[in-house]
Image (cartoon, rainbow, N blue to C red):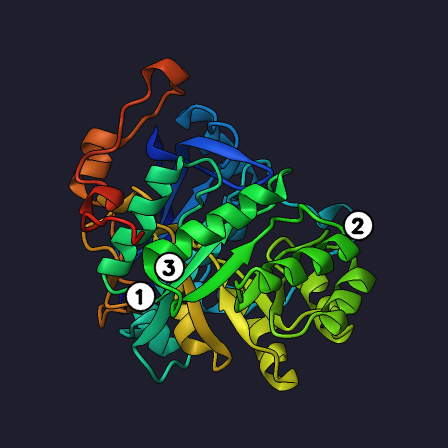
């Protein structure tokens, strides 16, 4: 019998310019920095995960490998992926800390991918999913876009079949926020589902006043995401109680314990989760028990589709037209306003030959020497669209 324990690992470093500046009221990002983490079992099966650094490039690949070998590998070598994804640990004292580099999510996704492949199941089915598609909303990460680029992005998304759209608010000039809402409705129509995201730009009373002002101006956002500070549980609970007609969606920036506290305090109408599969399933089960809807935020290469399909409280998943599909052979299929999971074992993604041979960047690059991702980008695939006037 061939052993299925983890016997080797491989890292691939990426660094390239994005096809647009992305960001929100707090951050501005123009390049992509990522690491592919591959865990290789003795039977030759490979589990793949991605680490992403939003604000600074990763160190050179040699240093990334050194840190991985020192901090992560001792807990993986010789272990079975399936036992590791279900392991319950008791973090105490100095053990309660993350690795020097953001490997945690990448390792978790790679372990689940490997375990599902060894079980011969698509990950969404291994997690208990009974459906194969979930609704997606078009999210522009659009705060820094010009009005023209903003309208082109969302108009193209509407022409592609999207019916729900999330935009970034939280500008110091609230008139600009109202202008963007107006431009969005001109572009996609007033019957579209609209969500807004302030990325903690407001205080509790300010948020209540601005939501009321949006509605008075004729805009009716389905939800407002992260309107105030993530840890202001009292403020979120008061905001939820004082706002009618718009849901409060929070939890994006919290860890498992923080999300549990948010739910137990009754401080959000919807819980926003991301890419750590084990934690997402754990908090998703609690949310289902409490009857709180869950939304799946951005995950690298849309691997979150699997947890979205597995959790009964998830109706929406975020999709942001990011230009990294060239890193894998077959990205998640997004069409007609839905994300469709594949029947391939695991999460269905594997590194492309181009990623390994053309796009790998083992040494840190200066900003002025960053390559641009290959065309056509996700944005250039969008149909051309003229805003309604």
- Residue 350 in sight: yes
How far across and how far down the image is residue 375, in percent? 18, 36
* Circle nearer the viewer, 2 or 1: 1
**109, 39: nearer the viewer:** 109
| Pointers 1 and 3 in contact (C-beta within 8 Å) | no
Direction from residue 209 to residue 38 in the image, left or right: left
**Label 2's element?**
helix
**168, 273: nearer the viewer:** 168
Marks 3 and 2 sit apart, C-alpha to C-alpha, by 32 Å
Is 346 situated above or below 108?
below
Image point (53%, 42%), residue name:
24
Direction from residue 380 to residue 144 in the image, left or right: right
How far across and how far down the image is residue 237, in percent? 77, 68
Q: How many labels does the image show?
A: 3
How far across and how far down the image is residue 46, in percent? 30, 55
Marks 1 and 3 sit apart, C-alpha to C-alpha, by 10 Å
Marks 2 and 1 sit apart, C-alpha to C-alpha, by 34 Å
**Which residue is the site of mark 2?**
93
**Which residue is the site of mark 1?**
346
- Pointer 1 or 3: first along the chain: 3
Image point (35%, 63%), residue name:
189
**Which residue is the site of mark 3?**
303
Q: Which mark is residue 271?
A: none
Direction from residue 267 to residue 295 in the image, left or right: left
How far across and how far down the image is residue 178, in percent? 54, 50
* Circle nearer the viewer, 1 or 3: 3
**Label 3's element?**
loop
């Amino acid at each position: 019998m061939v052993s299925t324990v983890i016997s080797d690992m491989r890292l691939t470093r990426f660094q390239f310019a994005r096809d647009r500046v992305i960001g929100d009221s707090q951050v501005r990002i123009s390049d992509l920095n990522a690491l592919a983490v591959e865990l290789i079992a003795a039977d030759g099966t490979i589990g793949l995960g991605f680490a992403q650094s939003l604000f600074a490039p990763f160190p050179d690949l040699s240093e990334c490998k050194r840190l991985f070998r020192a901090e992560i590998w001792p807990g993986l070598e010789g272990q079975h992926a399936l036992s590791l994804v279900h392991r319950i640990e008791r973090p105490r004292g100095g053990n309660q800390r993350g690795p020097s580099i953001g490997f945690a999510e990448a390792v978790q996704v790679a372990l689940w991918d490997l375990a599902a492949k060894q079980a011969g199941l698509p990950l969404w089915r291994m997690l208990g999913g009974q459906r194969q598609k979930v609704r997606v909303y078009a999210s522009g990460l659009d705060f820094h876009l010009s009005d023209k680029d903003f309208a082109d992005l969302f108009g193209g998304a509407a022409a592609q079949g999207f019916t729900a759209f999330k935009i970034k608010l939280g500008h110091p000039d609230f008139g600009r926020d109202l202008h963007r809402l107006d431009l969005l409705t001109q572009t996609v129509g007033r019957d579209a589902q609209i969500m807004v995201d302030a990325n903690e730009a407001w205080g509790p009373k300010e948020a209540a006043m601005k939501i009321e002002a949006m509605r008075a101006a004729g805009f009716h956002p389905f939800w407002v995401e992260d309107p105030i500070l993530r840890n202001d549980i009292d403020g979120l609970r008061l905001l939820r109680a004082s706002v009618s007609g718009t849901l409060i969606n929070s939890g994006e920036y919290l860890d498992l314990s923080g999300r549990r506290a948010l739910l137990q305090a009754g401080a959000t109408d919807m819980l926003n989760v991301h890419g750590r599969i084990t934690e997402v399933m754990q908090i998703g089960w609690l949310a289902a028990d409490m009857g709180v809807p869950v939304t799946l935020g951005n995950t690298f290469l849309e691997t979150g589709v699997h947890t979205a399909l597995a959790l009964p409280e998830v109706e929406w998943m975020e999709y942001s037209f990011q230009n990294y599909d060239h890193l894998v052979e077959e990205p998640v299929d997004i069409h007609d306003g839905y994300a469709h999971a594949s029947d391939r074992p695991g999460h269905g993604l594997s590194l492309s030959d181009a990623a390994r041979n053309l796009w790998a960047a083992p040494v840190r690059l200066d900003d002025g020497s960053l390559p641009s991702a290959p065309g056509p980008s996700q944005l250039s695939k969008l149909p051309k669209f003229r805003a309604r006037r």
